[in-house]
Amino acid sequence: MANNKLKPADSYYTDIGPIACWRPTHKPSNSGYVTIKRNGVCIQLHRFVYEQYFGLIPEGMDLHHKCETRWCCNPYHLTPVTNAENTRLGQSAKLSVTQALDIRVRAQAGNNCVAIAKEYGISSTHVYYIRDNRKWATI
Ligand SMILES: [Zn+2]
């Protein structure tokens, strides 16, 4: 469908290469996630797709969107994490585009990534990912 075409801005670099986010035809709910009904039960579409590719999500684990796009159903953009880790990662996702750009420019210029992480209240891993275009790849 024409209105469902992926745009380059949806691209995200994964461990296996640049693969765009998968935009479902279903409209996301207010939470930003897409839910479907399966055997009479509402489930999150990204969890369903992930399990089709990689098997059951370990019990009690959340799925983290490495691409920071809640509606995305590309299983390669998803990784199982503990709820605590997902919360921590979600907090770091609160960066604005301007902040992420600032982090990338400063980190790529060789500034101390740990210091930048402290300044923004995010993990140094997150700073490395931004520096290396593994997060915020579209800016
Ligand atoms: Zn994605």
Image (spheres, rainbow, N blue to C red):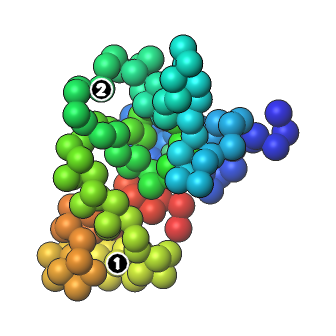
Please state if 60 lies on the left or on the right of 22 as rendered.
left
The amino acid type of the residue labelled 1 equals Ile
Residue at image mark 2: 57
Q: Tell me what residue is drawn at x 51 percent, y 23 percent.
A: 41
Q: Residues within 10 Å of mark 2 (few under 14, many from 20)?
A: some
Identified at 56% across, 18% down, the residue is 40
Under circle 1, the secondary element is helix
Q: Which quadrant of the structure image shows residue 104?
A: bottom left
Check the image and name the residue furthest to the top. 39
Q: Earlier in the sequence, mark 1 or mark 2?
A: 2
Q: Quadrant of the N terminus?
A: top right
Residue 36: x percent and y percent?
A: 59, 29
Name the residue at 24% across, 71% down: 122
Q: Against 36, is 65 above or below? A: below
Residue type at the position of mark 2: Ile
Dot 1: within a 10 Å radius of its alpha carbon, few (fewer than 14), some, or many (20 or more) residues?
many
Please name the residue that numbered disc 1 is placed on.
103
Q: Residue furthest front?
A: 40
SS category of the residue bearing label 2: loop
Lateral position of residue 125 relative to residue 20, left or right: left
| 83 up-or-down from 124: above or below | above
Image coordinates for residue 63, horizontal then vertical, percent = 34, 39
Does label 2 point to a residue whose CB lies under 8 Å from ligand 1? no
Res. 53 image quadrant: top left
As drawn, 88 above or below 8: below
Q: Is residue 50 left or right of residue 7?
A: left
